[in-house]
């Protein structure tokens, strides 16, 4: 969802949910998949927005899509979803949710379902109890940004906080957003700085080299230049294939 349409003073430095769905759709189309199950958490707007955009792209490519939306996943719901999945036996499953998706993944594997799992995070690693292994994860890692800048950022973060960045895309995009703003401010004289002049300066942002990628702000306040990739999740690590 492009929140920049809510106000001309909102600028979006990140990926739109529709772009995430495009990466997933291209994967299924290239593999010749015919039936896909999309299980999504409907408690917020983010997961449904990806699910709806993905469904539209897949159906336009004549791929059958089965929705399984939920607000919670208790034993009853998991059994219902599993029975439907067994009856359909799809080529792949898309999990758009949080830790609770691991319960579905585990159940699907326990009953012998073999379709490839797809997700946009790994927060279900513990609840899946091994079922997430071998999944395809749509993710942003330092490999997807400007490599030299992203690796330097990660190294500085590691040395300062003595820990790893668990969600690089959040940290990278936030860091780039701040630096784009600072760059815009530096381009103005102190007497010129106002909401309107700063907005105009931000709209001139072209090919800004951030840790997330080479970023350009569009006339509507959104941006492009940040690309996510699909990774194999193997032994707790992202492997690009």
Image (cartoon, helix red, strand yellow):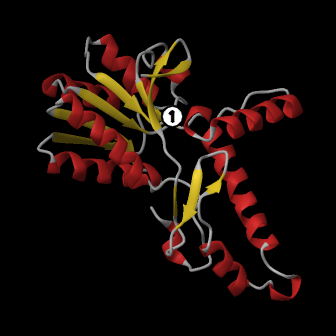
Q: Which residue is drawn at 67% across and 50% down?
A: 210
Decide if residue 167 is in sight here: no
**Most foreground residue, 164 or 26:** 26
Q: Position of residue 162 (x, y in %)?
A: 85, 27
> In the rendered view, does 58 fall on the left or right side of 74?
left
Q: Name the residue: 45% across, 15% down.
A: 133
Q: Element under label 1?
A: loop
According to the picture, the residue beneath numbered tag 1 turns out to be 121
Residue found 88% across the figure and 82% down from its top:
190
Instruction: List x then y, in percent, for residue 80.
Output: 26, 30
Quadrant occupied by the N terminus? bottom left
Answer with the quarter of the image where residue 161 lies: top right
Please determine whether, in this image, residue 89 is positioned above or below residue 45. Answer: above
Residue 32's x, y, as percent?
A: 16, 30
Q: Quadrant of residue 30?
A: top left
Q: Position of residue 36 (x, y in %)?
A: 22, 34
Q: Is residue 29 visible?
A: yes
């Amino acid at each position: 969802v492009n929140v920049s349409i809510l106000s001309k003073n909102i600028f979006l430095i990140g990926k739109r949910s529709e772009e995430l769905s495009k990466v997933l759709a291209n994967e299924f189309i290239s593999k010749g998949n015919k039936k896909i199950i999309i299980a999504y958490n409907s408690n917020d707007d983010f997961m449904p927005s990806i699910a709806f955009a993905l469904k539209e792209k897949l159906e336009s490519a004549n791929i059958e899509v089965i929705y399984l939306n939920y607000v919670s996943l208790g034993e009853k719901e998991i059994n219902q979803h599993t029975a439907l999945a067994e009856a359909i036996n799809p080529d792949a499953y898309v999990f758009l949710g949080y830790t609770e998706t691991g319960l579905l993944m585990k159940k699907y594997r326990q009953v012998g379902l073999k379709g490839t799992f797809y997700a946009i995070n790994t927060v279900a690693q513990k609840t899946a109890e091994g079922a997430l292994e071998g999944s395809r994860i749509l993710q942003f890692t330092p490999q997807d940004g400007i490599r030299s800048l992203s690796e330097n950022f990660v190294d500085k973060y590691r040395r300062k906080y003595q820990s790893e960045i668990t969600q690089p895309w959040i940290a990278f995009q936030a860091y780039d957003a701040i630096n784009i703003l600072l760059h815009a401010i530096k381009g103005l004289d102190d007497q010129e700085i106002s909401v309107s002049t700063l907005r105009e300066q931000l709209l001139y942002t072209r090919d800004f080299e951030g840790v997330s990628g080479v970023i350009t702000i569009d006339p509507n306040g959104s941006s492009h230049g940040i690309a996510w990739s699909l990774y194999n999740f193997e032994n707790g690590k992202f492997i690009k294939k």
